[in-house]
Amino acid sequence: MKNKKQKKHHTTKETHLAVNTLKGVLDVTKSGVGYVIVDNKIKDILVRQDKFNTALHGDTVRVKIIKENFKTGKCEGSITEVVARKQTEFIGKLQLSNNFAFCITDTEKPMPDLFIPLENIHQAKNGDKVVVRLVKWDKGDRKPVGEVISVLSADDDNDAAMKEILASAGFSLSFSEEVMKETALLPEQIDAKEISKRKDFRDTLTFTIDPVDAKDFDDAISIKTINKDLYEIGVHIADVSHYVTPNSQLDEEAYRRATSVYLPDRVNPMLPEKISNELCSLRPHEDKLTFSAVFEITTKGVIKKYWIGKTIIHSDKRFTYEDVQQIIETKEGLYKTEILLLNNLSQKLRKERFSKGAINFSSQEVRFQLDEKGKPIGIIVKTSKESHQLIEELMLLANKTVATYFTTATEKNKIPFPYRVHDKPDEEKLQPFAALAIKYGYHLDISTPEKIAESFNAMLAAAKGKPEQQIIEQLGIRTMAKAVYTTNNIGHYGLAFPYYCHFTSPIRRYPDILVHRSLQNLIQGKNVADKKLEEKCRHCSDNEKAAMDCERAGNKYKQVEFMQEHLGEEFEGIISGVASFGFWVETIEHKCEGLVTVTSLSDYDIFRLVEEDYCLVGKNSHKVFRIGDKILIKIVAAHLDKKQLDYAWVLPTKSSTKKKESKR
């Protein structure tokens, strides 16, 4: 009887705790005060430093409200629990004494120094720049306890900067010993019993098409003639889920990262190299396990039927995009008949997609030419060509088909599935953009979602090759909703697909692994529902955003580093954004963005922001700096630590124009 009472008391206490605490993310300001951001609270909860209770900036925490002002709605709280750490690896300087050491971190947000016991310094010396992993911080500890996991080279600022970008976003810089041991035990030979369970495509012509510097190949295409008007096209995806099994150390680490991060000089992978570059990389002349979507398609691009399941393949050739583009343009080269046929089919699929309301955003990729030390010596702007579109359309087809197949097959059971969704545009956000478009002579019809897509495509086509093209595209993308992962399917507006998911990149995206597992359960007849799937989708969406922020920061660092060599030089640019304190300009030649402040314009005039017109207007001169305008700028400062470029406006005089022309 006594035990029952104790159990009842414990349950009541737990319930009381749940009611009195809220879950959120701690945001620490530069002053050291924190705010817990809770989704369902209008006001953030203020937390003073002495009430952090071992929480650090970005951590997911539980907070108890200790003061509340009902008139203002302001709350003050105390953190009761750290639910999940955002960051567990830190970069800083080692301070070594006789009995212990400290790591003084380089973080922008205030945080305590990490205490390093002598047995955890691992040959690091006093003053070294180190990467330290947080190993323990219990409530009774005055300081967090850390362990040195690597020493950074004193003369390699680039390496430290890239690692700092990754670590501060919560991405681990290395894999734990446990993960590496588990990975090492994965068999390199494919078991004959496993092969017998799969559809064998090893005798079907198969190849990969990837960037020239790619090291992991997670998708391959097979092609076989059925008759003169009908072809079997296979989209084969690395079967990562065969090796990364639920609840393993490897799976937990892949989920925690949720994505690979691509920086200018490196990839921070979601999976260890043995998986990403060896076991699951669809390298030529090797048998590989795959998960496939196989289509019977007519020469007109009509899909007669499809099959989805586990397969084994043997890639005959590794193509680069450049190889395939040359074959498309010259109509000569290895497997030219098959590649030209695939290109023809993909262009038909592309045309059909746009006819159904998909938005035709053209993409430009900025890539840095780096020397052996990672220093940028050139910038290349790459555009999407037919070779890229060939792969893109087949991957879109596979993703769409998989999502449609799963949804249709589970209509009665309503088993949750990790969709990739894109919401319809917000009319309020579109109105100022539509008004700007009119100034360039374009009409955006915002009466219905269908009309938005139709008129948007017409506007993009009309603006192609004109000075305003880039601005129309950039602002258009900003007005659109962001695509996310969720079990609540609302379709993908931008692609005009009612059902869509990510199936084709499981080496670098965790949601694709979730899709593979869901599919395999369905194929095996298992009625399995993952109750935490929506939570996993949110985590993957959050980490995708964090990875994109890292990629932007890495690119910005390289832009600033590149422009350091061009201080005082003048370049033509396009105004890419405006604010009350100035406007941003992106150079036409290098796509490097910098800020022209209103302070730097004060000798010329006083400027004010006209938000609805995306411009700054001079009080006396009536000079207008509008987004999309072409202007001449001079590079006046390049701040590597802030990843910031400062530009100055160059008045368009005859002398400055001649100066620019002479530089060419």
Image (cartoon, grey):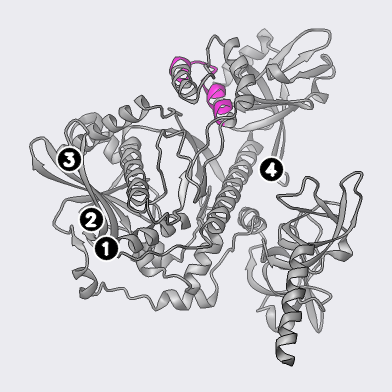
| Badge 3: residue crowd in 10 Å (few <14, some 14–19, many ≥20) | some
On residue 584, the disc is: none
CA gap between label 1 and label 2 equals 8 Å
Front tag of 4 and 1:
1
Looking at the rendered structure, the secondary structure element under dot 3 is helix
Image quarter hosting the N terminus: bottom right
Residue drawn at 41 percent across, 44 percent down: 500
Q: Earlier in the sequence, mark 4 or mark 3?
A: 3
Question: Residue 47 location in percent, x, y?
Answer: 85, 58
Residue drawn at 31 percent across, 64 percent down: 525
Q: Amino acid at mark 3?
A: Glu
Q: Nearer the viewer, residue 637 or 116?
A: 116
Question: Residue 419 location in percent, x, y?
Answer: 45, 48
On residue 338, the disc is: 3
Front tag of 4 and 2:
2
Q: Which residue is mark 1?
A: 288
Magenta residue span: 460-477
Whether residue 266 sits left or right of residue 107 in the image: it is left
Whether residue 458 sits left or right of residue 398 in the image: it is right
Magenta span has 474? yes
Mark 1 touches mark 3? (CB < 8 Å): no
Magenta span has 490? no
Q: Which residue is mark 2?
A: 315
Q: Which residue is mark 4?
A: 643
